[in-house]
Image (cartoon, rainbow, N blue to C red):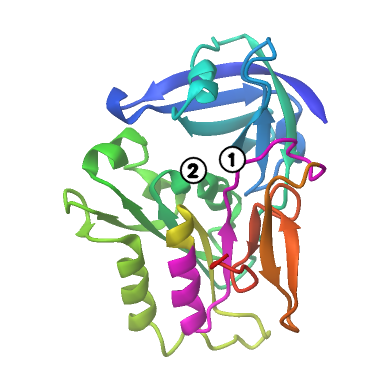
Amino acid sequence: MILKERVIENRIMGDPIQMLYKMVISGQAAQTATPGQFVHLQVADSNEPLLRRPLSIAGIDKNTEEVTIYYKVIGKGTELLTRIKENEYISVLGPLGTGFTVPDSGELLLVAGGIGIFPLLSLIQAVDKEKVKLKLLWGGENKQFIESAGLIDIEKMGVNLDMSTLDGSLGTKGLVTDLLESYLGDNTDTIAKPKDNGKQNLRVATCGPKGMLQAVTKICLGHNVPVEVSLEERMACGIGACLGCVCTVKDLEGNLKRKRVCKEGPVMDGKEVVWDE
């Protein structure tokens, strides 16, 4: 569905060098949006650029009918987005795609790399904190990036946070996958044992660069922990018609298939994804 949404907010976050922006749109999209989905935005009134830009949904407020999006300026399309002013209207296709599973018990471990934190925010928001234990492992390049994201106080959302930075300027020095290895290793006796109701004690949801997603999946499967990954691919139509964003997956019998990241994804079961293609 193509919607006309009003832009409530569109501003730069923190250090201008990081070029991180927050946009809040108001309208019908919030009514059907779920964690892990995305919206396809038309960045200008003209046909240049022709293609819309897919951006993950970071926040959903059905009461105020607001959807929050974060984006990093990396090209002409996202630069044009920064020019949209408050109270202007933007063409929105969506919400689109298949999102995260929202657990109703056990523990949910979130693993975020860089701006991969933003799609996970809507999942944090949706989880019932009284029934599900939330843990977030977040890795970034440095302290400046983490602070620019404006999420230093993210623990107020009811999630326990451990951070890592490549230069050690904030949190543990190293990769977020190092934190994951350590966390799963310290809890190996309990995390993979099913509860009395047959459900897994722990699930992992992750978003970040492809190499990180592959590493997270390998680590989780090595500990018998189910993992959902939010994939990123270049998209044209956003609705599965053009087949421009397909990835290879493997079913339970080992047969290779092609799935559309914009339709069957962006969130998929990590064990199904064929990473080395």
- Residue 97 lies, in percent from the top left, at 72, 47
Task: Decide: is 122 above or below 17.
Answer: below
Q: Are marks 2 and 1 in contact (CB under 8 Å)?
A: yes
The structure residue drawn at horizontal position 58% and vertical position 75%, both measured from the top left corner, is 226
- Residue 213 lies, in percent from the top left, at 48, 62
Q: Residue furthest front?
A: 277
Task: Tell me: 25 left or right of 70.
Answer: right
Q: Is residue 230 magenta?
A: yes
**Is any atom of residue 44 visible in this view?**
yes
Task: Decide: is 219 above or below 89.
Answer: below
**Residue under label 2:** 118
Query: In this picture, which residue range is highlighted in magenta?
Result: 214-241
Residue 56 numbered mark, or none = 1
Using a 10 Å C-alpha cutoff, classify the residue at mark 1 as few (fewer than 14 neighbours), some (14 to 19) or many (20 or more). Answer: many
Task: Tell me: 252 left or right of 165.
Answer: right
Q: Quadrant of the N terminus?
A: top right
